[in-house]
Image (spheres, helix red, strand yellow):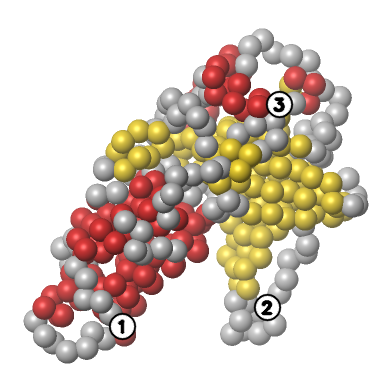
């Protein structure tokens, strides 16, 4: 109860900070029009990190467009500000999200108003249909047999013109097993600036809790990055020098595989290769989580890079240090 109260007080304090950042309270709008581009800012704590009371932040861009009688909802998790003040810091040899509740400064608010460049990596899109007063994506599918596991994302918006609740459900299951479901929800509690700013509570899988703010922005722009591969950018953003140490730690499957190869003990077993691939994926996921991001957004990259590292280790005979160099210079890419 004491932990819950402390966390609740922390969220309340952040709510006050967000309100102060946008000035005096304004009258609530009679109606919200979601069509257009929005900057989404979230302040939250995460029970699954080593510091569960540490405040963290995340932001992204949402775009809502009419598609005939339907609503198209696009999400871009890579947001690129020219002014990076307060957003990132050097930690463990990599650039990571600053561990605090980042708040846009005046220059960054101007960038939001004009439209922020976004990256395509990790972007998602759903087309929602009107069901009563709400918007919902296609109904969940059910796997045809016990041997087939399906993954479905269900997106919905309730009370879209009042105080919208944005809900995302991830469902994994088969015909004979119950689905594994993850839920992310943004619940609007306050509408400001004529419907151009929404404040409310944020939850994800009951482990991330906090507050959010949606601010209407200028139209999104495509980010024109430097001539670096996707793998290089991924390494710089999420992995860094600690990645090699985590891979080659005492007792790791990778160290066992390297030792077996060095001692000439013949072909490494498929079981050991699978353990190496699983450990690499787990290390990547934890590194992404510690950087303040959500590894679920990068499932494709984690799986692909894990397979690439496995191949470099077993097929090419590379050492852990050489593998990191291959990531750094783009020879291993998702």
Q: Which residue is mark 3?
A: 197
Q: Which image quadrant is residue 145 in?
A: bottom right
Q: Is residue 173 above or below residue 59?
A: below
Of marks 1 and 2, which one's residue comes earlier in the chain? 2
Along the horizontal axis of the image, is 91 left or right of 251?
right
Graded by Cα atoms within 10 Å as few (under 14), some (14 to 19) or many (20 or more), the crowding at tag 3 reads: many
Which residue sits at x=78%, y=26%?
195
Along the horizontal axis of the image, is 230 left or right of 76?
left
Q: CA distance from mark 1 to mark 2?
A: 28 Å
What x and y, as percent, mark residue 209?
53, 39
Q: Is residue 2 above or below residue 124?
A: above
Which residue sits at x=55%, y=24%?
108
Graded by Cα atoms within 10 Å as few (under 14), some (14 to 19) or many (20 or more), the crowding at tag 2 reads: some
- Confirm or deny contact between disc 3 and disc 1 (CB under 8 A): no
User: Residue 266, can we see it?
Assistant: yes
Along the horizontal axis of the image, is 266 left or right of 40?
left
Q: Which residue is mark 2?
A: 143
Which residue sits at x=77%, y=50%?
72
- Label drawn at residue 271: 1
Q: Secondary structure at mark 2?
A: loop
Q: Which image quadrant is residue 266 in?
A: bottom left
Which residue sits at x=59%, y=26%?
111
- Confirm or deny contact between disc 1 and disc 2 (CB under 8 A): no
Q: Secondary structure at mark 1?
A: helix
Q: CA distance from mark 2 to mark 3?
A: 40 Å
């Amino acid at each position: 109860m004491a932990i819950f109260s402390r966390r609740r007080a922390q969220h309340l304090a952040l709510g006050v900070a967000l309100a102060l950042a946008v000035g005096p309270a304004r009258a609530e709008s009679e109606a919200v029009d979601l069509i257009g581009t929005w900057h989404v800012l979230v302040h939250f704590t995460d029970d699954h990190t080593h510091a569960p009371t540490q405040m963290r932040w995340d932001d992204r861009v949402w775009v809502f467009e009419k598609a005939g009688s339907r609503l198209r909802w696009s999400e871009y998790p890579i947001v690129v500000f020219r002014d990076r003040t307060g957003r990132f810091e050097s930690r463990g040899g990599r650039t990571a999200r600053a561990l605090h509740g980042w708040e846009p400064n005046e220059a960054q608010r101007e960038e939001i108003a004009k439209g922020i460049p976004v990256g395509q990596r990790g972007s998602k899109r759903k087309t929602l249909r009107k069901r009563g007063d709400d918007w919902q994506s296609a109904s969940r599918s059910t796997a045809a047999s016990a041997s087939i596991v399906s993954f479905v994302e269900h997106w919905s918006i309730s009370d879209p013109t009042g105080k919208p609740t944005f809900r995302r459900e991830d469902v994994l299951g088969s015909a004979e097993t119950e689905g594994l479901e993850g839920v992310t929800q943004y619940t609007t509690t306050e509408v400001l600036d004529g419907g151009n700013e929404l404040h409310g509570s944020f939850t994800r899988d009951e482990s991330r809790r906090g507050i959010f703010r949606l601010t209407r922005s200028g139209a999104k722009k495509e980010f024109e990055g430097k001539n670096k591969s996707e793998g290089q950018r991924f390494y710089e953003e999420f992995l860094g020098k600690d990645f090699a140490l985590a891979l080659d730690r005492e007792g790791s499957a990778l160290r066992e595989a390297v030792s077996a190869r060095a001692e000439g003990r013949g072909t490494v077993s498929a079981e050991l290769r699978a353990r190496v691939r699983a450990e690499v994926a787990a290390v990547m996921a934890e590194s992404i989580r510690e950087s303040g991001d959500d590894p679920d957004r990068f499932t494709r990259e984690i799986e692909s890079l894990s397979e690439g590292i496995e191949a470099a280790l077993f097929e090419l005979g590379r050492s852990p240090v050489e593998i990191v160099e291959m990531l750094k210079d783009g020879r291993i890419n998702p």
